[in-house]
Amino acid sequence: MAENTKEKILIAYASRYGSTQEIAESMARILEEQGFAIDCMNVMDVRDIGPYAAVVAGSPIYMGKWLVEAVDFIKLFRNDLKIRPLAIFAVGYSMKEESDVIRKSARASMSEVTMYVQPQAEGLFAGKFDPDTMSQADLQIMKMAGAVPGDARDWTMIGNWTRALPSILFTLEPED
């Protein structure tokens, strides 16, 4: 696998309890299998996106929004993200319910990001609710919402979306 600029992709994620990180790592494996050089890292560890031909950025949805560090990543690199292909994804446990209202709400969680950048692809994925890993405050919010613990991630959907990314990201011209 050649590590030239045309083939190197950054997957940058924010993750509070590990579910979004696991999804990002799965995406990295899939794209590596397709021959791309991948760096998969927390948004807080990214210092430069210059070496990457494309960026995939994701965050869990908390209280209807992306995590602040994920939004800060987009804001910090917005000029560079406007001149290279970008895909974004959001992960929320509520996405286990496939309703128009839930999808609209999840899509709205990305509005704070899409005001700065225009991604070529957007993914919405169900997450995981593991009460053993959560803070008491977040656990109370989930309980008030009536959430039942479980892993609602659809690995087939995530895989299909990820496998489609190269044809989307590398055939559309990014905005100037």
Image (spheres, rainbow, N blue to C red):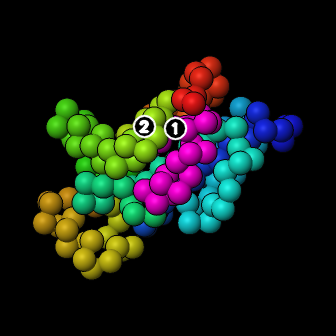
Cβ–Cβ below 8 Å for labels 2 and 1?
A: yes
Q: How far from the left and from the top, in percent, is residue 25?
A: 60, 52
The mark tally for this picture is: 2
Identify the residue shown where x is 64% and y is 25%: 170
Q: Give the percent coordinates (x, y) of residue 113.
A: 40, 47
Rendered location of residue 49, percent (x, y): 67, 51
| Quadrant hosting residue 149 | bottom left
Where residue 53 sits in the image (x, y, percent)?
A: 70, 38
- Depth check, front residue: 72 or 55: 72
| Whole-number angstrom distance, CA of label 2 to CA of label 1 | 8 Å
Q: Is residue 118 magenta?
A: no
Which kind of residue does numbered mark 2 sit on?
Gly
Question: Which residue is at a point 13% across and 66% down the rendered structure image?
Answer: 144
Badge 2: residue crowd in 10 Å (few <14, some 14–19, many ≥20): some
Res 103 visible? yes
Which residue is at the front of the view, 50 or 67? 50
Q: What secondary structure is found at the residue carrying circle 2?
A: strand
Residue beneath disc 2: 123
Q: Which residue is mark 1?
A: 87
| Residue visible at 23% across and 37% down in the picture | 104
Give the left or right position of residue 33, taking residue 134 as reference. right
Give the residues drawn in magenta, as a range.
Answer: 71-90
Q: Quadrant of residue 133?
A: bottom left
Above or below residue 74? Residue 81 is above
Q: Residues within 10 Å of mark 1 (few under 14, many from 20)?
A: many
Dot 1 amino acid type: Ala
Viewer-closest of 78 and 23 = 78
Mark 1 falls on what kind of element? strand
Q: Residue farthest to the bottom?
A: 136
Quadrant assignment for the C terminus: top right
* Label 2 vs 1, first from the N-terminus: 1
Q: Is residue 87 above or below residue 69?
A: above
